[in-house]
Amino acid sequence: MTILNIETSTSCCSAAITIDGKAVAQKANLNGANHASELAVFVEELLETASKNGWTLDAVALSEGPGSYTGLRIGASLAKGVCYGRNIPLIPVDTLQILCAAAQAVAPDMEENAILCPMIDARRMEVYTAQYQPTNLQRIGDIEAKIIDTTSYGELLEKGKAYFFGNGAAKCKEVISAKNACFVDDVVPQAIYMGQLAEQQATQKILDVKQVAYYEPFYLKEFVAAPSHIKGLE
């Protein structure tokens, strides 16, 4: 399959075209949350590249969350637009699973019998997280919004090693101090890691154009607007 992949769940913004699971073109900004201005440009450039190379898109894959409410909304809106415009389906992909794929690319020597624990920052000491098997990246249990303290993952880490990564893991280093806790730095969800996951997901969960109209990202938690601190808008 030839797939346009979109990832906007964190402060990193990226898009990529994959063919049979392999990235053949990509655009990314990993240095700041400018999704509203950058994503459309990235996608337009990638669609031009696809046209020049004679690649016909079969689907759009979208990092579905959890993550930044605003980032997920921007990604979903643009993904829907491409699906409508080209009459192609949407493939939602678990953001935490994408993080696992990124971690394996950054640290390919991770132990095969360890548990993968991706973490996305949910503010304060809370993270969006779940546990995954390293061999097939299948999830163990549910995705949750978890408050991290000194007792977190105690039972898991008594049994063996676990790898923690993502922008929520950095703040947990001093709290999760068991010897079996391993932290992998510089792991961010990116569109280039979505191809194989999207190919697998396409056999299980794919939304046609009619279903795309009702699609909503997986926010996990309801959005709560904070009071404005702009003078005159209090």
Image: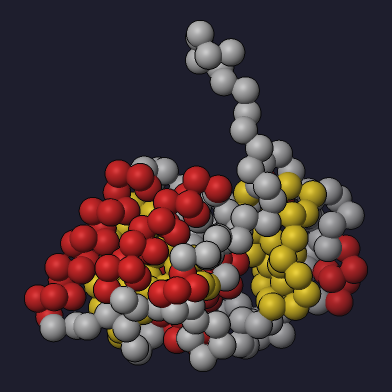
From the viewer's perspective, tell me whether residue 182 is left or right of residue 211: right
> Image height check: is 139 above or below 75?
below
In the rendered view, would you say 97 is above or below 170? Answer: below
Report the side of 97 relative to 22 (left or right).
Answer: right
Instruction: Give the side of residue 106 with respect to residue 121, left or right.
Output: left
Q: Position of residue 55 (x, y in %)?
A: 19, 83
Residue 54: % across, % down: 13, 83
Q: Is residue 55 visible?
A: yes
Q: Choose top left, top right, bottom left or bottom right for residue 77.
A: bottom left
Residue ID at (62%, 33%): 225
The residue most toward the front is 210
Quadrant (top left, top right, bottom left, bottom right) of the N terminus: bottom left
- Indicate whether 116 appears above or below 29: below
Which of the two residues, 192 or 83, is positioned nearer the viewer here? 83
Q: Residue furthest top?
A: 232
Residue at screen point 63% across, 28% down: 226
Q: Residue at x 38, y 85 (%)?
A: 21
Q: Give the answer, above or below, for where 65 lies relative to 36.
A: below
Q: Please identify the quadrant where the C terminus is shown.
A: top right
Q: Quadrant of residue 53?
A: bottom left
Residue 184 shows up from this direction:
no
